[in-house]
Image (tube, grey):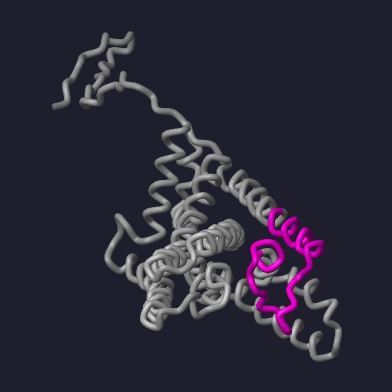
Amino acid sequence: MAVEQPAPVTAGGDQSRIHDIGYRGYDGPRLGRGYARRSLYSQSLRGAYGLGRSVKSKVLPMLLFVVMCVPAAIMVAVAVATKAHELPLAHAYTRWAIVMQAVISLYVASQAPQSVSRDLRFKTVPLYFSRPIETADYVRAKFAALASALFVLTGAPLLVMYAGALLAKMGFAHQTEEFAQGLVSVALLSLLFAGIGLVIAAVTPRRGFGIAAVIAVLTISYGAVSTLQAIADVQGSTGTVPWIGLFSPVTLVDGVQSAFLGGSSGFPGGTGPSHGEGVVYVLVVLGLIAACYALLIRRYKKVGL
Protein backbone atom coordinates (compact mmCIF):
# COMPACT_ATOMS: atom_id res chain seq x y z
CA MET A 1 0.00 0.00 0.00
CA ALA A 2 1.27 3.45 -0.87
CA VAL A 3 2.19 5.60 2.10
CA GLU A 4 2.14 9.36 1.91
CA GLN A 5 4.91 11.18 3.71
CA PRO A 6 4.32 14.90 4.08
CA ALA A 7 7.17 17.13 3.02
CA PRO A 8 8.09 20.46 4.58
CA VAL A 9 5.99 23.42 3.48
CA THR A 10 7.85 25.62 1.00
CA ALA A 11 8.13 29.37 1.23
CA GLY A 12 5.35 29.78 -1.33
CA GLY A 13 2.91 27.83 0.79
CA ASP A 14 2.75 24.77 -1.55
CA GLN A 15 2.90 21.39 0.11
CA SER A 16 4.45 18.48 -1.81
CA ARG A 17 4.13 14.77 -0.96
CA ILE A 18 6.46 11.83 -1.39
CA HIS A 19 4.64 8.59 -2.21
CA ASP A 20 6.20 5.32 -1.13
CA ILE A 21 4.84 2.82 -3.70
CA GLY A 22 6.47 -0.21 -2.18
CA TYR A 23 9.61 -0.75 -4.29
CA ARG A 24 12.37 -2.43 -2.38
CA GLY A 25 16.08 -2.37 -2.99
CA TYR A 26 18.11 -5.47 -3.86
CA ASP A 27 21.06 -6.31 -1.62
CA GLY A 28 21.74 -9.83 -2.92
CA PRO A 29 24.66 -11.09 -5.05
CA ARG A 30 25.31 -9.58 -8.48
CA LEU A 31 25.87 -12.47 -10.88
CA GLY A 32 27.56 -10.35 -13.55
CA ARG A 33 28.32 -10.70 -17.25
CA GLY A 34 29.13 -14.40 -17.22
CA TYR A 35 25.74 -15.37 -15.85
CA ALA A 36 23.95 -13.02 -18.25
CA ARG A 37 25.89 -14.46 -21.19
CA ARG A 38 25.14 -18.05 -20.17
CA SER A 39 21.46 -17.22 -19.68
CA LEU A 40 21.23 -15.64 -23.14
CA TYR A 41 23.01 -18.64 -24.68
CA SER A 42 20.69 -21.11 -22.93
CA GLN A 43 17.57 -19.16 -23.87
CA SER A 44 18.66 -18.86 -27.52
CA LEU A 45 19.59 -22.56 -27.76
CA ARG A 46 16.24 -23.61 -26.32
CA GLY A 47 14.47 -21.22 -28.67
CA ALA A 48 16.21 -22.79 -31.67
CA TYR A 49 14.12 -25.91 -31.04
CA GLY A 50 11.02 -24.10 -29.84
CA LEU A 51 11.50 -25.10 -26.19
CA GLY A 52 9.77 -22.69 -23.85
CA ARG A 53 7.75 -21.30 -26.74
CA SER A 54 4.39 -22.15 -28.32
CA VAL A 55 3.64 -25.53 -29.90
CA LYS A 56 3.62 -23.89 -33.31
CA SER A 57 7.23 -22.80 -32.82
CA LYS A 58 8.31 -26.36 -32.09
CA VAL A 59 6.86 -27.97 -35.21
CA LEU A 60 9.39 -27.00 -37.89
CA PRO A 61 12.66 -27.47 -35.95
CA MET A 62 11.53 -30.78 -34.50
CA LEU A 63 10.29 -31.96 -37.90
CA LEU A 64 13.63 -31.10 -39.50
CA PHE A 65 15.44 -32.91 -36.69
CA VAL A 66 13.36 -36.03 -37.39
CA VAL A 67 14.01 -35.72 -41.13
CA MET A 68 17.76 -35.65 -40.43
CA CYS A 69 17.69 -38.70 -38.13
CA VAL A 70 15.08 -41.08 -39.57
CA PRO A 71 16.87 -41.82 -42.89
CA ALA A 72 20.05 -42.50 -40.90
CA ALA A 73 18.14 -44.93 -38.69
CA ILE A 74 16.67 -46.66 -41.78
CA MET A 75 20.14 -46.98 -43.30
CA VAL A 76 21.41 -48.56 -40.07
CA ALA A 77 18.45 -50.95 -40.00
CA VAL A 78 19.22 -52.06 -43.56
CA ALA A 79 22.87 -52.61 -42.66
CA VAL A 80 21.92 -54.67 -39.59
CA ALA A 81 19.33 -56.72 -41.50
CA THR A 82 21.73 -57.53 -44.34
CA LYS A 83 24.65 -58.11 -41.94
CA ALA A 84 26.75 -55.67 -43.93
CA HIS A 85 30.32 -54.85 -42.90
CA GLU A 86 29.93 -51.17 -43.86
CA LEU A 87 27.11 -48.66 -43.91
CA PRO A 88 25.30 -48.48 -47.29
CA LEU A 89 26.46 -44.90 -47.92
CA ALA A 90 30.20 -44.70 -48.52
CA HIS A 91 31.93 -42.38 -46.02
CA ALA A 92 28.52 -41.89 -44.43
CA TYR A 93 29.72 -39.84 -41.46
CA THR A 94 31.34 -37.11 -43.55
CA ARG A 95 28.87 -37.29 -46.46
CA TRP A 96 25.65 -37.12 -44.46
CA ALA A 97 25.60 -33.36 -43.92
CA ILE A 98 26.39 -32.76 -47.60
CA VAL A 99 23.62 -35.12 -48.72
CA MET A 100 21.15 -33.45 -46.33
CA GLN A 101 22.34 -29.88 -46.96
CA ALA A 102 18.88 -28.76 -48.14
CA VAL A 103 17.38 -29.70 -44.76
CA ILE A 104 20.22 -27.96 -42.91
CA SER A 105 19.82 -24.81 -45.02
CA LEU A 106 16.10 -24.75 -44.27
CA TYR A 107 16.81 -25.06 -40.54
CA VAL A 108 19.29 -22.18 -40.63
CA ALA A 109 16.86 -20.06 -42.65
CA SER A 110 14.09 -20.63 -40.13
CA GLN A 111 16.05 -20.28 -36.90
CA ALA A 112 18.64 -17.56 -37.59
CA PRO A 113 15.94 -14.86 -38.01
CA GLN A 114 14.10 -16.25 -34.99
CA SER A 115 17.25 -15.77 -32.94
CA VAL A 116 17.91 -12.12 -33.78
CA SER A 117 15.09 -10.58 -35.82
CA ARG A 118 12.64 -10.21 -32.93
CA ASP A 119 15.17 -8.29 -30.87
CA LEU A 120 15.67 -5.94 -33.80
CA ARG A 121 11.97 -5.63 -34.59
CA PHE A 122 10.93 -4.81 -31.03
CA LYS A 123 14.06 -2.67 -30.42
CA THR A 124 15.07 -4.60 -27.32
CA VAL A 125 18.77 -4.85 -28.23
CA PRO A 126 19.73 -1.64 -26.35
CA LEU A 127 18.14 -3.11 -23.22
CA TYR A 128 20.57 -6.05 -23.35
CA PHE A 129 23.49 -3.63 -23.52
CA SER A 130 22.33 -1.41 -20.67
CA ARG A 131 24.13 -3.53 -18.03
CA PRO A 132 26.01 -5.79 -17.46
CA ILE A 133 26.06 -7.50 -20.90
CA GLU A 134 28.07 -5.98 -23.73
CA THR A 135 27.96 -6.19 -27.52
CA ALA A 136 30.54 -8.99 -27.73
CA ASP A 137 28.66 -11.00 -25.08
CA TYR A 138 25.41 -10.77 -27.03
CA VAL A 139 27.03 -11.78 -30.32
CA ARG A 140 28.99 -14.66 -28.77
CA ALA A 141 25.91 -16.03 -27.03
CA LYS A 142 23.76 -15.88 -30.18
CA PHE A 143 26.53 -17.27 -32.40
CA ALA A 144 27.33 -20.10 -29.99
CA ALA A 145 23.65 -20.96 -29.48
CA LEU A 146 22.83 -21.30 -33.18
CA ALA A 147 26.08 -23.17 -33.87
CA SER A 148 25.27 -25.56 -30.99
CA ALA A 149 21.74 -26.08 -32.30
CA LEU A 150 23.15 -26.88 -35.74
CA PHE A 151 25.71 -29.24 -34.24
CA VAL A 152 22.90 -31.12 -32.49
CA LEU A 153 20.93 -31.26 -35.76
CA THR A 154 23.88 -32.53 -37.81
CA GLY A 155 25.59 -34.60 -35.13
CA ALA A 156 22.56 -36.59 -33.97
CA PRO A 157 22.24 -38.69 -37.17
CA LEU A 158 25.96 -39.44 -36.99
CA LEU A 159 25.46 -40.74 -33.46
CA VAL A 160 22.56 -42.88 -34.69
CA MET A 161 24.76 -44.35 -37.43
CA TYR A 162 27.66 -44.92 -35.05
CA ALA A 163 25.51 -46.68 -32.45
CA GLY A 164 23.92 -48.80 -35.17
CA ALA A 165 27.29 -49.71 -36.66
CA LEU A 166 28.56 -50.89 -33.28
CA LEU A 167 25.40 -52.90 -32.71
CA ALA A 168 25.94 -54.49 -36.12
CA LYS A 169 29.47 -55.42 -34.94
CA MET A 170 31.25 -53.43 -37.59
CA GLY A 171 34.91 -52.59 -37.00
CA PHE A 172 35.11 -50.51 -33.81
CA ALA A 173 38.34 -48.67 -34.63
CA HIS A 174 37.32 -47.87 -38.19
CA GLN A 175 33.84 -46.69 -37.22
CA THR A 176 35.18 -44.59 -34.35
CA GLU A 177 37.71 -42.89 -36.61
CA GLU A 178 35.10 -42.07 -39.25
CA PHE A 179 32.65 -40.91 -36.57
CA ALA A 180 35.25 -38.51 -35.14
CA GLN A 181 36.01 -37.19 -38.63
CA GLY A 182 32.31 -36.65 -39.21
CA LEU A 183 31.98 -34.70 -35.97
CA VAL A 184 34.82 -32.38 -37.00
CA SER A 185 33.16 -31.85 -40.38
CA VAL A 186 29.74 -30.97 -38.95
CA ALA A 187 31.35 -28.73 -36.31
CA LEU A 188 32.92 -26.64 -39.08
CA LEU A 189 29.66 -26.65 -41.00
CA SER A 190 27.72 -25.56 -37.91
CA LEU A 191 30.02 -22.61 -37.22
CA LEU A 192 30.05 -21.50 -40.86
CA PHE A 193 26.31 -21.80 -41.46
CA ALA A 194 25.48 -20.17 -38.11
CA GLY A 195 27.71 -17.20 -38.89
CA ILE A 196 26.31 -16.70 -42.39
CA GLY A 197 22.72 -17.11 -41.23
CA LEU A 198 23.06 -14.63 -38.36
CA VAL A 199 24.82 -12.00 -40.48
CA ILE A 200 22.03 -12.13 -43.07
CA ALA A 201 19.26 -12.21 -40.47
CA ALA A 202 20.76 -9.29 -38.53
CA VAL A 203 20.41 -7.01 -41.55
CA THR A 204 16.61 -6.84 -41.36
CA PRO A 205 14.09 -6.95 -38.49
CA ARG A 206 11.56 -8.65 -40.77
CA ARG A 207 11.71 -12.38 -40.20
CA GLY A 208 10.21 -13.25 -43.59
CA PHE A 209 12.86 -11.30 -45.45
CA GLY A 210 15.56 -12.93 -43.34
CA ILE A 211 14.28 -16.44 -44.11
CA ALA A 212 14.14 -15.76 -47.85
CA ALA A 213 17.60 -14.17 -47.88
CA VAL A 214 19.26 -17.06 -46.02
CA ILE A 215 17.66 -19.65 -48.30
CA ALA A 216 18.71 -17.67 -51.36
CA VAL A 217 22.33 -17.31 -50.27
CA LEU A 218 22.80 -20.96 -49.24
CA THR A 219 20.88 -22.69 -52.03
CA ILE A 220 21.55 -20.39 -54.99
CA SER A 221 25.28 -20.28 -54.27
CA TYR A 222 25.40 -24.09 -54.08
CA GLY A 223 23.40 -24.48 -57.28
CA ALA A 224 25.50 -21.94 -59.17
CA VAL A 225 28.82 -23.40 -58.00
CA SER A 226 27.73 -26.99 -58.77
CA THR A 227 26.64 -25.94 -62.26
CA LEU A 228 29.91 -24.16 -62.97
CA GLN A 229 31.90 -27.13 -61.67
CA ALA A 230 29.95 -29.49 -63.95
CA ILE A 231 30.58 -27.23 -66.95
CA ALA A 232 34.29 -27.02 -66.16
CA ASP A 233 34.50 -30.80 -65.80
CA VAL A 234 32.73 -31.41 -69.14
CA GLN A 235 35.06 -28.98 -70.89
CA GLY A 236 38.10 -30.72 -69.47
CA SER A 237 39.10 -27.94 -67.05
CA THR A 238 39.31 -30.28 -64.09
CA GLY A 239 41.97 -28.13 -62.44
CA THR A 240 39.50 -25.27 -61.95
CA VAL A 241 36.82 -27.44 -60.33
CA PRO A 242 38.26 -27.23 -56.78
CA TRP A 243 38.78 -23.47 -57.03
CA ILE A 244 35.18 -22.89 -58.08
CA GLY A 245 34.14 -24.75 -54.92
CA LEU A 246 35.47 -21.88 -52.79
CA PHE A 247 32.38 -19.80 -53.58
CA SER A 248 29.68 -21.82 -51.79
CA PRO A 249 29.42 -22.70 -48.08
CA VAL A 250 28.33 -26.26 -48.84
CA THR A 251 31.17 -26.98 -51.27
CA LEU A 252 33.63 -25.35 -48.89
CA VAL A 253 32.79 -27.87 -46.18
CA ASP A 254 32.74 -30.65 -48.79
CA GLY A 255 36.24 -29.68 -49.88
CA VAL A 256 37.62 -29.60 -46.34
CA GLN A 257 36.23 -32.98 -45.37
CA SER A 258 37.34 -34.65 -48.62
CA ALA A 259 40.86 -33.18 -48.36
CA PHE A 260 41.57 -33.88 -44.68
CA LEU A 261 38.81 -35.96 -43.10
CA GLY A 262 38.81 -39.02 -45.32
CA GLY A 263 35.49 -38.23 -46.98
CA SER A 264 34.53 -38.72 -50.61
CA SER A 265 33.96 -35.61 -52.66
CA GLY A 266 30.70 -34.55 -54.24
CA PHE A 267 32.54 -32.56 -56.89
CA PRO A 268 32.08 -33.63 -60.55
CA GLY A 269 34.18 -36.70 -61.26
CA GLY A 270 34.69 -37.19 -57.51
CA THR A 271 37.92 -35.18 -57.67
CA GLY A 272 38.06 -33.11 -54.52
CA PRO A 273 40.78 -30.63 -53.65
CA SER A 274 44.32 -31.83 -53.00
CA HIS A 275 45.96 -31.31 -49.61
CA GLY A 276 47.50 -28.05 -50.80
CA GLU A 277 44.15 -26.81 -52.10
CA GLY A 278 42.52 -28.13 -48.94
CA VAL A 279 44.68 -25.77 -46.87
CA VAL A 280 43.16 -22.89 -48.83
CA TYR A 281 39.69 -24.30 -48.12
CA VAL A 282 40.41 -24.42 -44.39
CA LEU A 283 41.73 -20.86 -44.38
CA VAL A 284 38.68 -19.62 -46.29
CA VAL A 285 36.28 -21.39 -43.89
CA LEU A 286 38.03 -20.01 -40.81
CA GLY A 287 38.26 -16.57 -42.42
CA LEU A 288 34.54 -16.55 -43.20
CA ILE A 289 33.67 -17.56 -39.64
CA ALA A 290 35.87 -14.77 -38.26
CA ALA A 291 34.44 -12.27 -40.78
CA CYS A 292 30.87 -13.18 -39.80
CA TYR A 293 31.71 -12.63 -36.13
CA ALA A 294 33.33 -9.26 -36.89
CA LEU A 295 30.35 -8.16 -39.02
CA LEU A 296 27.94 -9.09 -36.23
CA ILE A 297 29.97 -7.09 -33.69
CA ARG A 298 29.95 -4.08 -36.00
CA ARG A 299 26.24 -4.42 -36.70
CA TYR A 300 25.23 -4.61 -33.04
CA LYS A 301 27.46 -1.77 -31.98
CA LYS A 302 25.39 0.40 -34.30
CA VAL A 303 22.07 -1.10 -33.18
CA GLY A 304 22.91 -0.73 -29.50
CA LEU A 305 23.57 3.01 -29.69
Is 235 rendered above or below residue 134?
A: below
Measuring from the top left, give residue 101's x and y in whole percent: 55, 74
Q: Is residue 228 magenta?
A: no
Percent position of residue 75, x then y: 42, 79
| Residue 18, image x, y percentages | 25, 19
User: Relative to 250, is 161 on the left or the right?
Assistant: left
Residue sitting at 67 percent across and 72 percent down?
Answer: 251
The stretch in magenta equals 257-286
At horizontal 48% and vertical 75% (from top left) the residue drawn is 85
Numbered disc total = 0
Tell which of 244 and 181 is nearer to you: 181
Residue 273, quarter of picture:
bottom right
Q: Position of residue 280 (x, y in %)?
A: 78, 60
Q: Within the magenta stretch, is there residue 284? A: yes
54 left or right of 182 in image: left
The residue lying toward the viewer, choosing from 228 and 302, is 228
- Chief secondary structure of the magenta span? helix
Instruction: Work out which residue is located at the far left of the displayed protein and give it.
Output: 1
Left/right placement of residue 268 relative to residue 200 reads right
Residue at (16% x, 21% y) in the render: 3
